[in-house]
Amino acid sequence: MIFDIDTTSSLPIYAQIVAQVKHAVAAGIVRAGDTLPSLRETSSRLRVNPLTVSKAYRQLEAEGIVVTDHGRGTFISAKLADLGEEYRRKALDKAADRLLVEAYHLGASADEIRLAVENRLRKMRDV
């Protein structure tokens, strides 16, 4: 798994790592038993303090998303099916909120929003 860190983001680096792992789990990019890169490897590749990566991995472990086997590595938890689904729902809710706020500022009606979403879904199916 390769992390993409945005140093201009207001989101702290450790939180970006956490969010990217959660997204990868929800999207099925990583599965139970997959190994995360080591702390040293990740901190070196991202050019960040190892404590930053450690903080992200600790938070992921506290949330039950990863398990750490000292000496072997950090692995995606076998118990994460519900966590991935929960993250997916929350991410979709946030995306819907952003859409609705933007639509409100544009003065769009509920019918216009529904039509725009339906059109996009049709285009996605046609691809």
Image (spheres, helix red, strand yellow):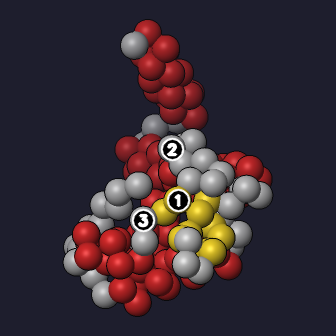
Q: Nearer the viewer, residue 58 or 84?
A: 58
Q: Nearer the viewer, mark 3 or mark 2?
A: 3
Please report the residue visible at 52 percent of the width from the left and 59 percent of the height from the top. 35
Mark 3 vs mark 2, CA separation in Å: 14 Å
- Viewed as shown, does residue 120 lie left or right of 118? left
Does residue 17 show up? yes
Q: What's the amino acid at mark 1?
A: Thr
- Mark 1 packing: few (<14 Cα in 10 Å), some, or many (20+)? some
Q: x, y percentage for residue 47?
A: 22, 78
Q: Which residue is mark 2?
A: 29
- Mark 3 packing: few (<14 Cα in 10 Å), some, or many (20+)? some
Badges 3 and 1: C-beta atoms under 8 Å apart?
yes
Mark 2 vs mark 1, CA separation in Å: 12 Å
Position of the C terminus, as image quadrant, is top left
Please report the residue visible at 51 percent of the width from the left and 44 percent of the height from the top. 29
First-in-chain label (2 vs 1): 2
Position of the N terminus, as image quadrant, is bottom left
Q: Which residue is mark 3?
A: 37
Q: Which residue is mark 1?
A: 35
First-in-chain label (3 vs 2): 2
Displayed quadrant of residue 74: bottom right
Does residue 100 show up? no
Q: Secondary structure at mark 2?
A: loop
Please report the residue visible at 56 percent of the width from the left and 28 percent of the height from the top. 114
